[in-house]
Image (cartoon, rainbow, N blue to C red):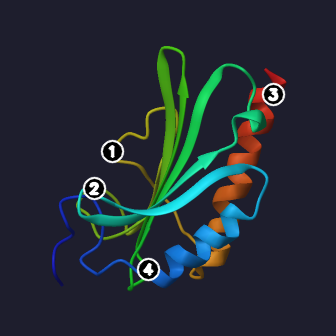
Amino acid sequence: MVPPTGDGGSPAPIDRPILEFLQTRLHATRQVSHAAITDASGHFELQVVFASSYYPAPVDDATLTVRWYTNDDFTIHYRELHSGHTWECRWDRHPNPHNTRDHFHPPPTAPTPGDDDSWPTDHRDVLQLVLDEIEDRIAALWDD
């Protein structure tokens, strides 16, 4: 097997049709103000900006970045910018030396190594899992 790329991703190419599907799905929600596929640093990824009205005042900005590969490896990075700090976590499936292929980098700092975990095989199920966890996070922010 080819070692993972230096970006913490996969040795496989990006699966653009899946990124386009996820872009369409996310852009259709009221929670998302912008979703675009970009070529950030030579790597295609889906960049999502959540609507500021969806978050309480302490959150200045909330984003989701998705890279999905043709071998179904992925990295999904959620980040909130608060005044004075960042809160983030990441769901990953890719070969690496620090965890099993499926793993989670928990909040608030998304440290490496992360926690070994298991993700669904279908990209739609993975997206739903991530969105459900983000919804739980937003509910907790509003409760604070």
Disc 1 marks which amino acid? Thr
Q: Secondary structure at mark 2?
A: loop
Residue under the image location 75 percent in, 49 percent down:
31
Residue type beneath disc 3: Trp
Q: Earlier in the sequence, mark 1 or mark 3?
A: 1
Q: Position of residue 35 (x, y in %)?
A: 57, 58
* Vertical position of residue 122 compared to residue 84: above or below: below
Mark 2 residue type:
His
Dot placed on the residue nearer the N-terminal end, 4 or 1: 4
The three-letter amino acid code for the residue at tag 4 is Arg
Given residues 95 and 144, the one toward you in this image is 144
The residues tagged by marks 2 and 3 sit, at their Cα atoms, a distance apart of 34 Å
Tell which tag, 4 or 1, sits nearer the viewer. Answer: 4
Q: Are marks 2 and 1 in contact (CB under 8 Å)?
A: yes
Which is more N-terminal, label 4 or label 2? Answer: 4
Specify whether 43 is left or right of 47.
left
**Residue where numbered disc 1 is placed:** 112
**Which type of secondary structure does the marked residue at label 4 adopt?**
helix
